[in-house]
Image (cartoon, rainbow, N blue to C red):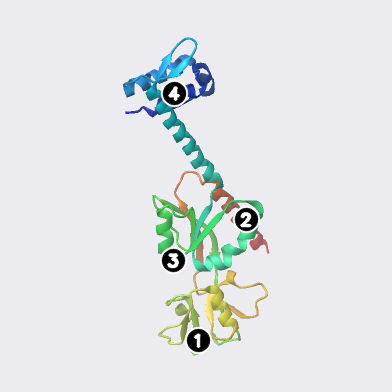
Amino acid sequence: MIDYRYLKAFLLTASYSSFSRAALELKIAQSAVSRQIKLLEETLGTELIVRSSKKVLLTTQGKELYLAVKNFDHQAENIFKSSKSGPLRIGALHGLLEDWLTPLLPAYFKKYERPMHIEVGPISKLRQGIEAGEFDCIFSTDNIQSELLTSLKIFDETNVLISKEEINLKQLTDYRWITYVEVDHIHKLCKGPHNKIISVNSLTSIVNLVRSGVGIAVVPDHVLKKNERLFVTKLPQLKKSEVFMTTLNTQHLPLHLQELLELINLEEKKFGDN
């Protein structure tokens, strides 16, 4: 069995054909380098280097091991280089991508050149994806705290009722409802069934349908434009939703996620100041 602790000493000695240069790079004594290689040879049961006072020569097996270790060292270095410049893989709920994350991206790409891959899906798919290593982070309304994952709250999501014309809040069942899912926030405002419902899996389309006078809807306030020509009614009876950024539960947040989080915090602060 290979004792991997001593491979670096062997790799550097073979690369430079010099114990002294390997010792200089490892910042240890030359005798320590020689000792480490000797221990490596003992664990392998074969000689890797032919020692002389003038030259360092590799045996046949030493040459083969050197090429294998050198290739591994190069591949490992490329892995960590690619993590610094590789794509940022994001999963997000459809509504968050459309109306919150997408407007942040121009500011991100003004500052960073990193490629990005974004995928939308339901919370179950996003969670499965990040656990499988398919995403670097996901954005959803689930606060996931486990041995594998951790969630950081990004902002509160306030839901409002929108309509093209002023409506009677006590008679919501008189209007057609446009919902995001079959059981929507608007159901919490009324008791009993309602059969005039359009379910649309797009918040942008929901707002457009309300603008056209097709019906009424409850949506997060961040999906609305500043000068929106709609009647917007606050709903204090509805509990605020929370939006979270979920990542693997590592001790230190990777640099590419730190960059994204810093930008999000900056943009959210600007939004709060306005």
Q: CA distance from mark 2 to mark 3?
A: 25 Å
Q: Nearer the viewer, residue 19 or 36?
A: 19
CA separation in Å, label 1 and label 2: 39 Å
Residue underneath mark 4: 10
Q: Quadrant of residue 7?
A: top left
Question: Which of the two discs, 1 and 2, sits closer to the camera?
Answer: 2
First along the sequence among labels 1 and 2: 2
Give amino acid for label 3.
Pro
**What residue did someone put label 1 on?**
176
Callout 1 environment at 10 Å: few (<14), some (14 to 19), or many (20+)?
some
Q: Secondary structure at mark 3?
A: loop
Residue 116 percent location from the top left of the image: 55, 55
**Res. 222 image quadrant:** bottom right
Q: Quadrant of the image for the N terminus?
A: top left
**Disc 3: which residue:** 122
102 displayed left or right of 8:
right
Label 3 or label 4, whichever lies nearer to me, is 4
Element class at badge 1: loop
What percent of the width, then of the height, locates residue 35? 41, 17
Q: Check disc 4 and give the amino acid type.
A: Phe
Q: Amino acid at mark 2?
A: Tyr
10 Å crowding of disc 3: few (<14), some (14-19), many (20+): few
Q: Which residue is mark 2?
A: 108
- Measured Cα–Cα span from mark 4 to mark 2: 44 Å
